[in-house]
Amino acid sequence: MVFDEMLLDDGEAMRRSGAADRLRAIAGAGARLRAAVRAAEEGGLAALRPEGRPTTVLVAGDVPAARTVADTLAALATPSLQVLHLEPEPAAPPHPPTEPRWTLPGWAGAMQLLLVLSPHGDSDGLHALVDRAYARGCATVAVTRPGTDLARAVEWARGLTLPFVPQPGEPAPGTNDQHADTADATTAAAADPAAGTDLWALLGPALALAHRVGVLAAPPEALDGAAARLDEIATRCRPDAATWDNPAKTLAVELAGSVPLLWAAGPAAVPAAHRLATLLADQAAIPALAARLPEALTAHRGLLHGPRAARTGASGGAAAAADAEADFFRDRVTEPDRPAPHVVLLDPAGETATEEDAPNAIGPLARRHAEAAGAPIDVLTAAPGHPLERLAELLALAEFTATYAGIGTGS
């Protein structure tokens, strides 16, 4: 895969490819978070008087951001709360397999809260899930556009619908057939450069809801701080910032031609690691693997010490010299370069101590593991603040990095 670094500073090329529209949508995440939280409060959240706390939050959605919402709630929630992301499954006949379905756990009941996320609210599978949750006695909250089929289903189930705040200028539902073929909808989404930038329009109301029911601490000042952090990263990662002064462009260049291994240092880093892996695959066709430390040291051992790492000199001594000689004489036309692993250590809480302070801590251990394999390593940290603010910084950096990686690869 060829990466053209010059494209990262070519504004005209960005406009022609549509990347400028996506970057503009990502840069507006802070404003969209504020608008989403305000709409949720006005849409019924302020009047909500919960009776007790749920023991489990079940998250289901028809967009990839639903996974990030579930990961974030799990990272910030109280230890007694379990957060479970319900994965979509192919529908059984007579429904076409392209229409996903969601299954409630057998133990789901009155002590569980179902959170449904759907920007368009036109999924028959989510409609059926709400019906089953009502039959089981689960409380149901949806983040979707008012007036959709999903919103009506939640209202019938005596649940709460929090309004989804679309991108400015986004067409209202109903301009296209809500029951269009799934393949057509997927094609349309792929043609929209800003598709998939709805994370904070879904995550904002979910965090405000979780704070209201008492399962995590996300007070208004923390949400305001997260929005301010999103604005700050948008300024630092703006398209006209030079690559050397733009952390997202810099990371995109460093990951070019590699297999990114995204290591999460602690539970608070898991949402950012999974999000970055998803976005790199979607926006730049770069396969990335995400795992939490210390599990990552075992899960990614084969990539670090296997054949892909051989040409980095990781084998050491005479073996490394033999690898270098073989690499010098190989035919670069018939045997192109193989992508080598590149470790990215995500640490929003700043918990990876230095070698001098705690040589046996997970941070120094991960660094030594990568260095022993000859793999380059980048460490992404966040400025001090509320855990939500730190996580927002890494999530925003993931969005910009994947977009710039897509620009460089021409994806």
Image (spheres, helix red, strand yellow):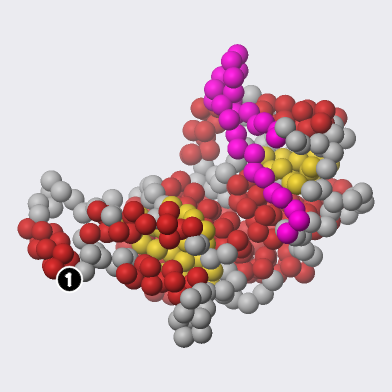
Question: Over which residues does the magenta segment extend?
Answer: 79-105
Indicate whether residue 104 is drawn in magenta. yes
Q: Position of residue 44 (x, y in %)?
A: 87, 48
Q: Is residue 12 visible?
A: no
371 with respect to 82 (left or right): left
Say which of 99 and 74 sits in front: 74
Q: Main secondary structure of the magenta part?
A: loop
Reply above or below: 212 against 367: above
Q: Position of residue 347 (x, y in %)?
A: 54, 69
Q: Residue furthest top?
A: 94
Quadrant in the rendering for residue 149: top right
Reply above or below: 236 against 133: below
Q: Residue at x 42, y 57 (%)?
A: 298
Q: Is residue 255 visible?
A: yes
Q: Residue at x 85, y 51 (%)?
A: 53
Say which of 191 and 155 sits in front: 155
Amino acid type, mark 1: Gly
